[in-house]
Amino acid sequence: MRARAAVLVLSLLVPLGVVTTASPALATPVATDDAAYERCGRVFPDPQAFAPSPTPAPGESPYAKGNAVCRAVDFIQHSEALAGLEYLEQRYPGFVEVYNLKEDFAEVLDLAKGEGQSAGLPTNTLTRDRADLHMVRITDESVPEKDKKKFLFTLSLHGIEKAGLEGGLRAAEDLATWAAETPEQPVMETLDSSLPAGEVLKKSSVWFAMNNPDGWRRGDTSLGGISYQRYNGNGVDLNRDWPEKGYTFRPFTPASEPETATFAKVLKAISPTWAGGVDLHGQLIDRAFSFTLLGASQRPYGKNQRMLQFTQGAYQDAETRLAWNPLIKPNDAPEACVPPGTGGTVTDPTTGCDPTPRVYGVQYGTIWDTIAYTVTGAIGNWADSDIGLNADFIDNEMSLSHLSNCGIGKCFVQSAEQLHVDGNKSLIYAMLNYTLQPEDQRFRFTGRAAYLTQPKRLVHKGRAAPAPTSNLPVQEPISTQLVKQPTADATFEFDVDGPRQGVQNGGIVAKATFSNVQGVGPGAVLGIAVDRFSAEEPEPGGSQWTTVNQDYNQSPVYLQSGMQVDANDLVPGRYRFRVFGPGAALVAADISFTRGRAWPDPGQRPYDVSNLDFFEELRPHVAAGQLTAVPAADVAAGRNNLRTYDTVIAADRTVTDPRTARALRAFAESGGNVVLTDDAVNALGAMGIVDPDAIESEPVYAGSVSFTGPDGASTYDDPLARNVDLPGSAEGPDRRRQTTEPVPTGYAIQDENGGDAATLPQHGVTQAAWEEAGGRTVGTVGDSSSGNVTYGELTVGKGRIRILGSFLPFPTDEFDHPFGLNDYAITFTAYELAKNSWSWTNPARLATPPPARPATGRLPATGAEVWPALVALLGVGLLLVRRRRART
């Protein structure tokens, strides 16, 4: 997660009497042989293990596993985890398999590029200590692997966020132990009706990935660690390094890190598609102890329903599973008087708010609605998309698993870690249990609806990145050391050779290792760059050196001691390696050259997208004949009688002809329901409903609706807001609910410096104009202070006009999108708003439905253009008929 204020929040637990810490000198412990297992009762005993007592101590978890004599008193060390998993495999060989990816998947990896290992933790000798990468599979090996659903759980991709590892490793042990010893054990411990563990492992192959050994090992007590690390050894955020279908922030140089490249290749080799998974993270502290995040992707309705079934099931489980801890309050409790972690004080506890520092157990929602930002380059987005695993993949953030632990992520608080264990088990078991059961995928709304179509699509045929043009070798690597002084840059100049020197370099990898103590160094205040010299005279005040690329230092708080810069398309000439910033350090510089791309920039992948493809993907989930495509041009020309429908939906860019707008108004006046979304809201002007100047388009960070009326009161009880304020669902400020994700359809969320950017257009009507037209406000633009109405209804004649200002924006190619674009990216809230706004009974509807016809002249299966061919065939047919008639 992105660090908010580095607030020490362990004090939240003090008034509740739940803080217990342990001496770091003690072992974790982990059982790695039969004698230790007999003593501990588990390979990885829980922090609040209580056996052989039949019940836990008051205020402790009834779900804790293991013997009390072996209660965990420190985070599981990297070496302990591997040894413990190997023993677990030895104990349950038919259910556990530990994989060393460098050895077991060597055939799919490029070992020469360092794949199969971590980037390497910087050492105090300015070298790198690289670690092999591992996964563990839990499954019933008596059932063929090809018949099973695949699940992936990534553990603490950010090494400082220990919750994922602490919970994930213990969940792996639970599953193997239950399946081997008590296969009838319900996998959801709070529900008697859940699937038994034995059946789960016969139907599924469950993989746990340990993605960031560098960040993990930097803080291990057994290695003398000082502080756990968010990044890998190169100072790169591994949760921003994944290819993203949609907007891409190029300074992240996707898939540049060996960890990302390794896991992407291995996961695809295991299976091209996966059923589901969770990326398990940590955070400081927030209004909920745990946030379940539904990330950004093109999510058809069936997938939306599967993911909701899981997230809502996990929420219900956690309401019971976490209730033992007095820090946790149920989701129907009042909100806190003072937001957790802000350090504020309660000034007026009589307002109905909660004056205690308690937090909700679990809330679910979009990334923005939960943790107030969204991302590009996350593993969850990649795994959830068709360029990744096409899985039902989500992310999770769990509080008290970050810098909030002593400011360095090192304090092991047994009560907090037991919450992490219980909370992550809830997520893992719910994902398995609910994904293996059917869900309701019927999209239900009242009436028959037509949606307007237009033929425009956004198309790119693709452009491959340049490939090597010769078989020449690459240049030999260069290594040197520099002394960085506090007030000046440290530089090292070198030549990049070319074919004249008998080499060809496709890319460059420049790596820095700073002086450090146990991997903690001055990288927080330093940066590195690769510059190229130009012989041309510079502009006044300019330089003859141009930066080719520099590292993107996401945050200064993690004290990283390694960095890396990757650059492609090298031109021979004079270059320099530059260390800049206000700090001082001894720097080892390692410069190597690649034959192909230094980072796998794909050039431009092809795409052919339209927001209106949403309706075609929705049709299988709607009752037969309930949703019909109608070309907007036919409506404008009067070739379609809209009165055979209850509702007509006009999405972005489908109402560009004033005649269409007039036809829609006439339809509403006769008793129909018109739904205008996105740019089509502008049709209100052409309809004569409001002054065109009162309709505004605002650039927003993400599309959303604030369910607040003109008087500031909640509108959740409005019929158009039905099923929005669901139990356990998260909301942003002012009851904001996200409707549209910007990244998948190409809208930028970052400026060139990495700051937040608002580029997605959202439409609305000024409050005064809307009320003057007789409109009812259900919601305003959530990411704005304008107060413009973006969701609402007004009566026109016998019918209705409803607007939703951010639902299906047309994709954009304005910003970087090298991995392609999606057609649409709506949220689970937007699906509910669609059901609500489309539901209507037209009192004047004609009974006879129109004949079905293709919407755009495209074959649904192939996308081939068919109308020209049909016209040609019709012409040939008429000619033959005439000839036959002439002969007879």
Image (tube, helix red, strand yellow):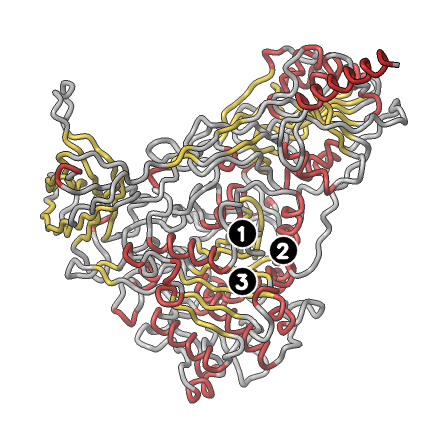
Instruction: Find residue 339 and report its horizontal and vertical position in percent.
Output: 49, 47
Instruction: Report helix, strand or loop for mark 2.
Output: helix
Q: Is residue 161 left or right of residue 707?
A: left
The residues bearing labels 2 and 1 have C-alpha atoms spaced at a distance of 10 Å
What amino acid is at disc 1? Ile
The residue lying at 71 percent from left, 19 percent from top is 871
Instruction: Report helix, strand or loop for mark 1.
Output: strand
Instruction: Find residue 266 and report its horizontal and vertical position in percent.
Output: 43, 58
Residue 423: assigned label: 3
Q: Earlier in the sequence, mark 1 or mark 3?
A: 1
Q: How many marks?
A: 3
The residue lying at 42 percent from left, 31 percent from top is 757
Q: Is residue 860 left or right of residue 447?
A: left
What amino acid is at disc 2? Phe
| Nearer to us in this view, 99 or 875 | 875
Residue to which mark 1 is pinned: 394
What amino acid is at disc 3? Gly
Residue 310: assigned label: 2
The residues bearing labels 2 and 3 have C-alpha atoms spaced at a distance of 14 Å
Instruction: Find residue 133 and report its horizontal and vertical position in percent.
Output: 36, 63
Instruction: Find residue 428 and report its horizontal and vertical position in percent.
Output: 56, 62
Q: Earlier in the sequence, mark 2 or mark 3?
A: 2
